[in-house]
Amino acid sequence: MKIIFMGGGDFGCDTLRWLASSHHQILKVFTQPARPAGRGRSTTPTPIAALSNKLGLECLETANINSPENLEIIRQLVPDVIVVIAFGQWLGSALQKLPAKIINLHSSLLPKYRGAAPINWAIIQGEKITGVTVIEINDIWDGGGILASESLEIGETETAGELHDRLAALGPALIAEVLGEFEAGIYNPQKQNDCLACKAPKMQKSDGKIDFSRPAAEIKCKILGMWPWPGAFCFLQQEGSEPLRLSLCRCQLVNKAPSDLSPGSLDSQLDIVCGDGLALRLLEVKPDNSKLMTFKDFANGKRLKSGDIFC
């Protein structure tokens, strides 16, 4: 089949790589413009642009996929299917009216977690199972008919970054399944149950502030669901020292009797007491202007002791 691919982030790279090696023909790749990134804020192409260049695919950067110029380019290419993955731009009615089938690989089990950050929110909300869904694109954001889906279990201490990579790896097989059905003349999208829909809005850095007065299980999910972006964080307060900002990467619940220490306090095992009296054990942290490290190494370096406060 003749394919146009639209994507930006890493999530679509596995699928684009597979498409390039398949019997399908990639007519063109569309992606977002290069933007400043990293500490040096140097102009950096999207992961899809970089991969397209490596694979020798024709790639067009655009800030407006719905412009008359882009619409005419797509019309002239006459694609059978437009595959959209983590593109970040809304496809307007003129594009949707083209003869091509337009499909999207979304990183949740729709109708749950429609929006920009479904992987983060699935972990934050304490889901045990998530997955990916291929849908047709219509005028409802992430609300199109379901063509295929695949699920997997979320690990007990799995971060959003790790889950992202495992979900992305499901993309090639699922897109292959849908394209195979198209080739066989099968097109049977199943309507989503809008009553079960929930949103997964884009996250901000400020969302990462941890409040240790909340229950331990809730905090654990928030820490795991926010790594590596936007990153959960708190401040270590030690007597005689300035507060230190600390990014929290990985943690686990610990099975122990509730403590009467105040929330945020370290107990005798250097676990953090939370609002419900239960405790959380940090496993990996990143101090400001330092590298990711085990909490054990951090605790040794800072000589943490019972009674030190995280807030």
Image (spheres, helix red, strand yellow):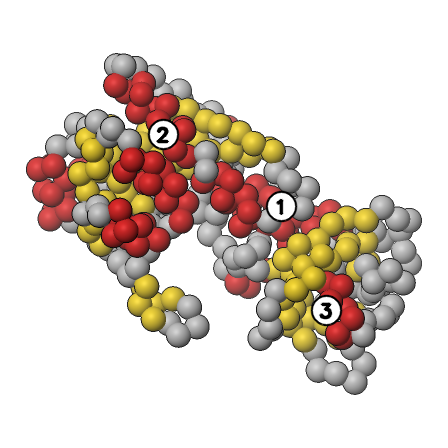
Is residue 64 visible in the rendered structure shown here? no
Q: Amino acid at mark 1?
A: Glu
Q: How many marks?
A: 3
Is residue 193 visible in the rendered structure shown here? yes
Q: Are marks 2 and 1 in contact (CB under 8 Å)?
A: no
Q: Name the foreground residue: 98 vs 180.
A: 180
Q: Amino acid at mark 2?
A: Ile
In the picture of the structure, the residue carrying the numbered disc 1 is 158
In the picture of the structure, the residue carrying the numbered disc 2 is 175
In the picture of the structure, the residue carrying the numbered disc 3 is 298
Q: Is residue 232 left or right of residue 102?
A: right
- Residue 41 location in percent, x, y? 37, 72
**Going from the N terminus, do you reach mark 2 or mark 1 first?**
1
User: In what element is the residue under mark 3?
Assistant: helix
Dot 2 alpha-carbon crowd within 10 angstroms: few under 14, some 14 to 19, many 20 or more: many
Dot 1 alpha-carbon crowd within 10 angstroms: few under 14, some 14 to 19, many 20 or more: some
Image vertical order of residue 230 relative to residue 150, above or below:
below
Label 2 vs label 3: CA separation? 44 Å
Q: Residue at x 17, y 38 (%)?
A: 27
Q: Residue at x 28, y 20 (%)?
A: 182
Q: Amino acid at mark 3?
A: Phe
- Residue 10 location in percent, x, y? 40, 49
Q: Which mark is residue 61?
A: none
Q: Is residue 175 left or right of residue 236?
A: left
Q: Is residue 95 left or right of residue 132?
A: left
Residue found farthest to the top: 185
- Say which quadrant the N terminus sits in: top left
Dot 3 alpha-carbon crowd within 10 angstroms: few under 14, some 14 to 19, many 20 or more: some
User: In what element is the residue under mark 2?
Assistant: helix
- Residue 104 location in percent, x, y? 35, 35
